[in-house]
Amino acid sequence: MRSAFNTFFLLSCISINAFAQINGQPPAQTIPHFQFFTFNNKPFTDNDLPKAKTVFFMFFDSDCDHCQHAIKSIGENFQAFKKTSIFLVSIDDQNKINHFMDTYGSKLKGQKNVIILQDKLQQFIVKFNPVRYPSMLLYSSEKKLLDYEDNPESVFRLVNTINKNAK
């Protein structure tokens, strides 16, 4: 039953994204209000984001090849992300996310500035308006969008934006 729901939700998300692309809606220009959950099931909201720090969100699906490539590339370029708060967000269950991180994101596991969040209320797509998986959004310390990328081959561009905005 849960699998059918996830499939339905994913198809709905694809429809929403297609509609957003047709209408040309850009990703959220400022960090919206949201509620995600940590692995210990505690709510994590936009009020919990660090103040005066660049914030990076990556919305991913554990089964997505492009997401797997992107998380590896971020791990390989972790030095550039060290002063950025990284939030990895997925609608997947904890076991799938753990497998994804163990297999592809092992260089990010245990890093102080990396937090993995579950989108149990399925808010990311509606509030952040991503186009496809993986969606990588970089926000300034003032919570304004600096860059958006959904091509895992272009992580270097995000690194350049981070370097330009480093304090």
Image: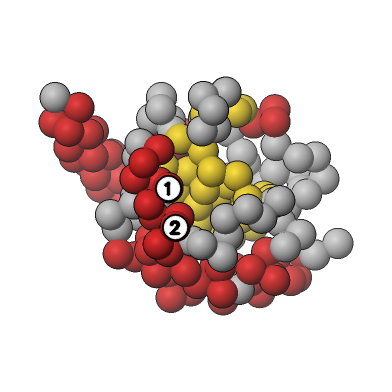
In the orientation shown, which residue stands out farthest toward the right? 167
Number of other residues with Cα within 10 Å of mark 2, as a class: few under 14, some 14 to 19, many 20 or more: few
Q: Residue at x 58, y 60 (%)?
A: 108
Which quarter of the figure is the C terminus placed in? Answer: bottom right
- The answer to whether residue 151 is seen in the rendering is no
Number of other residues with Cα within 10 Å of mark 1, as a class: few under 14, some 14 to 19, many 20 or more: some
Count of numbered marks: 2
Q: Give the SS element for disc 2.
A: helix
- The answer to whether residue 16 is seen in the rendering is yes
Whole-percent x, y for residue 166 in the image: 80, 65
Q: Do labels 1 and 2 touch, CB within 8 Å?
A: yes
Residue under label 2: 102
Q: Residue at x 14, y 24 (%)?
A: 1
Whole-percent x, y for residue 6 in the image: 22, 34
Whole-percent x, y for residue 57 in the image: 55, 49
Looking at the image, residue 163 lies above or below residue 129: below
| Res. 34 mark | none
Residue 132, located in which quarter of the rendered image? bottom left
Residue under label 1: 98
* CA–CA distance in space, label 1 to label 2: 6 Å
Looking at the image, residue 107 lies above or below residue 4: below
Could you tell whether 60 is left or right of 137 in the image?
left
Could you tell whether 154 is left or right of 115 in the image?
left
Q: Residue at x 75, y 70 (%)?
A: 164
Residue 43, located in which quarter of the rendered image? top right
Q: Amino acid at mark 1?
A: Asn
